[in-house]
Image (cartoon, rainbow, N blue to C red):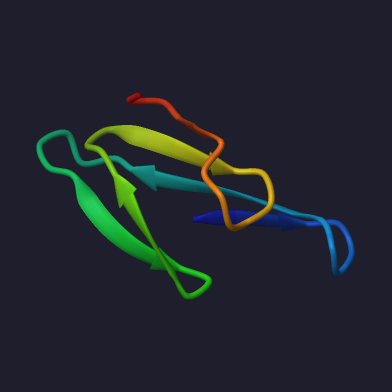
Amino acid sequence: AHMYRAGPEKCAAFLANVGTQSDQTVTFNGNSYHLPAWSVSILPDCKNVAFNSAK
């Protein structure tokens, strides 16, 4: 995960699964996220997935 902050209220994160064969479930900031194989999820508020490259 790569997380970017601009003060206490602005945050964005990128979650990646670089495995080519299997989906993964990861925990980030206390929440679980499903990451399809070979994908990146963008969380513009560090909580909600706005985009996943495999969908």
In the image shown, does 16 or 51 lie closer to the viewer? Answer: 51
Residue at the far bottom in the pictured view: 30
Give the vertical position of 36 relative to 4 (above or below): above
Residue at the far right in the pictured view: 7
Q: Position of residue 39 (x, y in %)?
A: 34, 33
Give the vertical position of 16 relative to 38 (above or below): below
Q: Position of residue 52 (x, y in %)?
A: 43, 32
In the image shown, does 2 or 52 lie closer to the viewer? Answer: 52
Is 35 on the left or on the right of 30, as rendered?
left
Quadrant assignment for the C terminus: top left
Total count of labels: 0
In the image shown, does 14 or 46 lie closer to the viewer? Answer: 46
| Residue sitting at x 10%, y 36% | 21
| Residue sitting at x 47%, y 75% | 30
Q: Position of residue 44 (x, y in %)?
A: 67, 44
| Residue sitting at x 56%, y 36% | 50
Q: Quadrant of residue 37?
A: top left
Q: Quadrant of residue 19?
A: top left
Q: Position of residue 12 (x, y in %)?
A: 68, 50
